[in-house]
Amino acid sequence: MAKRLRRRFVGFEREQGYAAAARRRIAAIEPFAADTLAPFMTAREAPRVPFTALLERGLVSPGAILVDNRRRVKALVRADGAISLGDKVGSIHRVGALAQGLDACNGWTFWHVETGQGLVSIDALRAEVRAEMG
């Protein structure tokens, strides 16, 4: 199992015949693909990415319009990383909550931006930034 999990291991055997059989058995084992062994990272463990990082990398531009997934709500992206919905200005989370009449909102999943490939959630853009972070 250690070889399948790409871990280092040490084996001990007193009998030469058993040791040879173990070496043959271990040599025949195929390790799991590296991407199946990547540790699971919860959202809380993932590196924090501020919304302004999307602006800095050019994934979202000041002046862009963010919309909900049904394109019913529209907010303007400001150069300072805030968004505005009418006269309300705030973070993607606060303005998303206001747009829905809620106390709280995960702005990353609520807001989307129109691209050449269609509507893309800003959470997908955040994932691109995280991938660059390593």
Image (spheres, grey):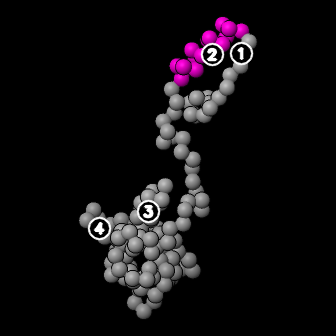
Which residue is under mark 3?
129
Residue picked out by circle 2: 22
Please identify the quarter of the rendering in which residue 65 is found: bottom left
Query: What segment is highlighted magenta in the picture?
Result: 15-29
Query: Upstream in the sequence, badge 4 or badge 1?
Result: 1
Name the kind of residue labelled 4 in the image.
Thr
Q: How many residues crowd mark 4 within 10 Å: few (<14), some (14–19), many (20+)?
A: few
Instruction: Give the secondary structure at mark 1.
Output: loop
Q: Distance of mark 3 from mark 1, alpha carbons?
A: 49 Å
Q: Name the residue that disc number 4 marks.
A: 115
Q: Would residue 40 appear left or right of 114 to someone viewing this image?
A: right
Residue where numbered disc 1 is placed:
13
Q: Main secondary structure of the magenta part?
A: helix
Give the mark nearest the N terminus, 3 or 1. Answer: 1
CB within 8 Å, label 3 to label 4: no
Tell me which amino acid carries mark 2. Ala
Q: CA distance from mark 2 to mark 3?
A: 45 Å
Picture coordinates of residue 88, whole percent (x, y) = 45, 89
Residue at image location 71% in from the left, 9% down from the top: 15
Q: CA distance from mark 3 to mark 4?
A: 17 Å
Query: Is residue 73 located in the magenta-colored stretch of the structure?
Result: no
